[in-house]
Amino acid sequence: MIDYEGMPKLIQLVNRTPSAIEEYPVRFETFAAGNGYVGSISDLNHLETTYQALLEAWAMHITTGRSFYRDCVSGENTEEELIDEIESEISNLA
């Protein structure tokens, strides 16, 4: 999850799905227990794509004001382009 201040958060989901959580503008379920992405069995090979997907969702939130649930990367922009877009949108808000 990413909170409204742009900070990533790991939260425990008990009897809730990420898509049902409304208090975070960016929701993601990659780190759900039992999927092999976390813990001692994980080789963490997904971290680059996870970061990219979170940047994409945060950029869309900053641009539109809407909330987003993501679990994949669109790949339309590079990491650098997304960061530039986010920084530009934030400077426009100030």
Image (cartoon, helix red, strand yellow):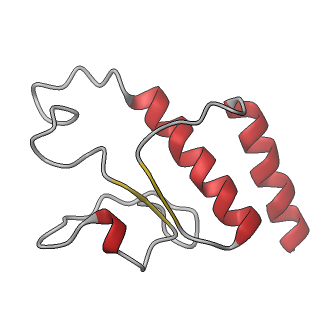
Q: In this view, does 5 lie above or below 49?
A: below
Q: Is residue 64 above or below residue 55?
A: below
Q: Quadrant of the N terminus?
A: bottom left
Q: In this view, does 12 lie above or below 30?
A: below
Query: From the viewer's perspective, is 13 left or right of 26?
Result: left
Query: From the viewer's perspective, is 11 left or right of 28?
Result: left
Out of 41 and 34, give the one closest to the viewer. 34
Q: Residue furthest bottom?
A: 23
Location of residue 15 in the rendering, given as x and y in whole percent from the top left corner: 12, 73
Residue shown at the point (62%, 46%) measured from the top left: 56
Residue shown at the point (90%, 67%) measured from the top left: 92
Location of residue 76 in the rendering, given as x and y in whole percent from the top left corner: 70, 33
Q: In which quarter of the image is residue 5?
A: bottom right
Q: Give the total number of marks visible in the rendering.
A: 0
Residue shown at the point (62%, 30%) measured from the top left: 75
Residue shown at the point (74%, 32%) measured from the top left: 80
Location of residue 24 in the rendering, given as x and y in whole percent from the top left corner: 45, 72
Q: Which residue lies furthest to the right in this view?
A: 92
Location of residue 72 in the rendering, given as x and y in whole percent from the top left corner: 45, 39
Q: Quadrant of the C terminus?
A: bottom right
Out of 43 and 30, give the one closest to the viewer. 30
Query: From the viewer's perspective, is 64 left or right of 12?
Result: right
